[in-house]
Image (cartoon, rainbow, N blue to C red):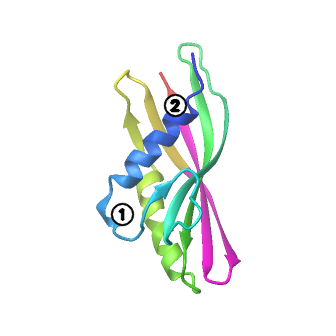
Amino acid sequence: MEKDMSFTVQGVIYTVLTGDGALMAKINEVYDVALEGAVLPYITIGQDVARAWNTKSKDGQVFDVSVHSFSGQENLAEAKGIAEEVYRLLKNMSFLLGDGTLVRSTYLQTATTVVRRQVVDVEQTFRVYVQK
């Protein structure tokens, strides 16, 4: 591909997540990096790792992208409920950009961490394919 598509991938994920009413009813915001004092619960579109994904006839890139669901509840129910919505939206996402670029994703893994008392982070990793 002619350029690094990581910002485009982040934008597609942001559009898919913020465009879903059921998810947005459960959280306050979707961030790339949460600001100091951000009100829980929220989602961050985290780190990504990119590599070439080319065929004989097409150029592409593949990304492993982390999406974090943060909750302010001591139990896991709120964070896991948010993560279920993220999974529903991104597990088999397919999104066609205006220039004919296809963005699609598959689910890889989930890890849950109690960051500190009353802050739970459910990190999900999705593999995102971009091909033109």
Query: What's the CA distance linking mark 1 and mark 2?
Result: 26 Å
Residue most extreme to the left: 21
Q: Which residues are magenta?
A: 107-130
Residue 119 bears which disc, if any?
Answer: none
94 relative to 101, above or below: below
Q: Is residue 122 a member of the stretch shown in magenta?
A: yes
Q: Earlier in the sequence, mark 1 or mark 2?
A: 1
Image check: 28 left or right of 112? left
Residue found at x 38% / y 38%: 95
- Is disc 2 placed on a helix, strand or loop? strand
Q: Is residue 95 a member of the stretch shown in magenta?
A: no
Q: Which residue is mark 2?
A: 130
Image check: 77 left or right of 55? left
Residue found at x 61% / y 34%: 62
Residue 65 picture location, percent across and down: 60, 47
**Mark toward the viewer: 1 or 2:** 1
- The secondary structure making up most of the magenta span is strand
- Classify 10 Å Cα crowding around label 2: few (below 14), some (14-19), many (20 and above): many
Residue 97 falls in which quadrant of the image? top left
Residue 129 falls in which quadrant of the image? top right
The kind of residue on which mark 1 rests is Met
Residue found at x 46% / y 57%: 30
Image check: 67 left or right of 21? right
Residue 24 bears which disc, if any?
Answer: 1
Residue found at x 42% / y 60%: 88
The kind of residue on which mark 2 rests is Val
Residue 34 falls in which quadrant of the image? bottom right
